[in-house]
Amino acid sequence: MDEPGIPHAQRSHVNFSLSSSLGNSLVPSPTLSINELVRQMWANGETVYHLGFGESRFPAHPAIVRALVEHASRQSYLPSAGIPELRQAVAGFHSRQLNREIRPDQVIVAPGSKSLLFAFQLALSGATVLHTPSWVSYEPQSRLFNRPVLRMPASPEDGHQLHPARLHRILRHSPYDQHLLILNSPSNPTGQMLEPALLEEIADICRREEVLVLSDEIYGLTAFGREHVSISSFYPEGTVVFGGMSKHLSLGGWRLGTALVPPGDSGQQLLQAVAKIGSELWSTASAPIQFAAVTAYADDAELASYVEKCTALHAARTRYLWRGLSELDISCAEPMGAFYLFPNFNHWRKPFASLGVQTSVDLARYLLEEWQIATLPGSDFGTPARELSLRLSTSYIDLETDQKAAELIEMASASANVEELLSSHHPGMNEVLARLKNLLSSL
Ligand code: PMP
Ligand code: GLU
């Protein structure tokens, strides 16, 4: 607002307007917002059962911490695509995992795979195709630079499965010349995985229609329902594989993500384009973290067994909550990986409506305000506003402090029966189930 009559030098503020390309649709990422809100509520002494945020809470492995300490004094800027030692280590790690050779020049690293997903979308022309529900940030990232997004509809009745015929239809009827398909298996938010036969079918469609796949496999090493298979095994020439240290190594705050481009000249062209974008946005991933990551990607049996132990706990905790929901007749697909559930409350639509709860946003708000349970509404993941779906993350509850998370790992190592451990050491999760039971019987 102008301050009429006041000379410029004495005005208390400068007039500016926000960029019109951001529009009014720009909101903070819902995942980070709910986490900040819950932390604020805890700081105020309030009780909140935190199913809102997906952050693996287990301790950083001591070997990786030692490597970070050893390299803490590395203060120089590094190459945009990553240091050669790390690109080599990541290539070796994925060559073993994918059972085919990945060369170091196919690897780029950045501060988080979130940054890389943004840069790849920015580098490529055309529209992004998303299976719904999809992780909260893919679509808002596209919107930041007006990239069109096409959503593949999915239905709660079959657990939001991906139907290749729908993909085919969308591509055939699309007004755009080029498309990127973002896949995410295991999935945030549903915890579902795409089975190999389905991946093969999707790969065939993408090859025929010349669609590049951005395969977000950041939860690949947290799969527990079936073995994780990458679509790049069926479509190596057209898949970019995304990963990082945030999930299986519980190092989200360290901000290190990876991408593997397809082999050959076009893959190199793409990597160079993304490295140029990175050079203008983040310059390089943090130097000490890159050097520590060389240890994290080493061929090390002890690290691999630590990852397996953490995944087994995510599996047991997520299945425990899923079983509890099933006993309450809340419809929810059985989890296969990561630490997410995507239950649906459409069955109680009528009684909820009489409480003023008509949308998933209303439902999430109601659960937080009346029952002290923090979740995220399905619509943050692209489902229709009136579909009463929620995303629940089991990663935080009963592991609110670093100490609790460390204790659980220790107890799990000593205990023969993880399920028993859960019912006796997970008061928060049990309380959530008790509250949901009370809520549903009050309707
Ligand atoms: N993809 C998915 C599906 C995620 O859940 C996350 C974590 N929020 C990311 C990508 C980004 O992870 P990061 O930036 O920590 O590598
Ligand atoms: N992946 C996490 C989630 O979905 C949070 C981190 C983020 O969104 O960047 O809750």
Image (tube, rainbow, N blue to C red):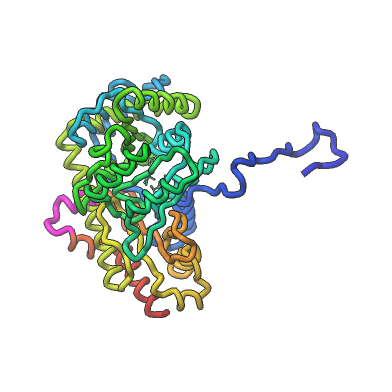
Q: Is residue 8 left or right of residue 68?
A: right
Residue 12, located in which quarter of the rendered image? top right
The single residue placed furthest to the right in the displayed view is: 5
Q: Main secondary structure of the magenta part?
A: helix
Q: Residue at x 18, y 61 (%)?
A: 419
Q: Position of residue 416 (x, y in %)?
A: 11, 56
Residue closest to the eye, 132 or 402: 132
> Do we see residue 154 in this rendering?
yes
Is 355 situated above or below 43? below
Residue closest to the eye, 100 or 255: 100
Residue closest to the eye, 287 or 272: 272
In reply to whether residue 84 is colored magenta, the answer given is no
Q: Is residue 388 left or right of residue 201?
A: right
In reply to whether residue 417 is colored magenta, the answer given is yes
Q: Position of residue 177 (x, y in %)?
A: 46, 38
| Magenta residues, start to end | 408-418
The single residue placed furthest to the left in the displayed view is: 416
Q: Position of residue 310 (x, y in %)?
A: 23, 48
Q: Residue at x 38, y 76 (%)?
A: 440
If the image is split into quadrants, where does the N terminus sit?
A: top right
Q: Residue at x 21, y 54 (%)?
A: 225
